[in-house]
């Protein structure tokens, strides 16, 4: 990159554009809610219920120090 000053300006412009877009989008979302956000609680569809999880079998492994008798002889 021969012109570092140009890339700095480009990054600044991109950051300002991103800030402007997010600010406009947030303002629009706050001032004009979607129809689903406008509806009362009775009109909203109920969330889907997940089936109860079945109990999982687990294997518990305990580490034990080997006794000298259990050690293989050389």
Image (cartoon, rainbow, N blue to C red):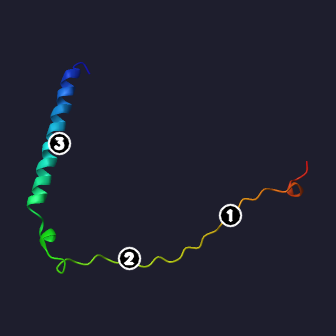
Residue 11, horizontal then vertical, whole percent = 20, 32
Q: Relative to 4, is 51 above or below? A: below
Question: Can you identify the residue that label 3 sits on?
Answer: 18
User: Tag 3: Cα neighbours inside 10 Å, few (<14), some, or many (≥20)?
Assistant: few
Looking at this rendering, what residue extends furthest in the top direction?
Answer: 2
Q: Along the horizontal axis of the image, is 26 left or right of 72? A: left
Residue 41, horizontal then vertical, whole percent = 19, 77
Quarter residue 60 falls in: bottom right
Question: Can you identify the residue that label 1 sits on?
Answer: 61
Residue 74, horizontal then vertical, whole percent = 91, 48
The answer to which of marks 3 and 2 sits earlier in the sequence is 3
Q: Secondary structure at mark 1?
A: loop
Number of residue marks: 3
Question: Can you identify the residue that label 2 sits on?
Answer: 50
Identify which residue, 40 or 21, lies in the foreground. 40
The answer to which of marks 2 and 1 sits earlier in the sequence is 2
């Amino acid at each position: 990159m021969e012109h570092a000053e140009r890339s700095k300006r480009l990054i600044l412009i991109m950051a300002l554009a991103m800030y402007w877009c997010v600010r406009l989008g947030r303002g629009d979302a706050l001032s004009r809610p979607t129809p689903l956000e406008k509806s009362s609680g009775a009109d909203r569809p109920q969330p889907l219920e997940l089936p109860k999880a079945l109990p999982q079998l687990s294997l518990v492994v305990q580490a034990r120090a080997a006794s000298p008798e259990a050690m293989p002889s050389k």
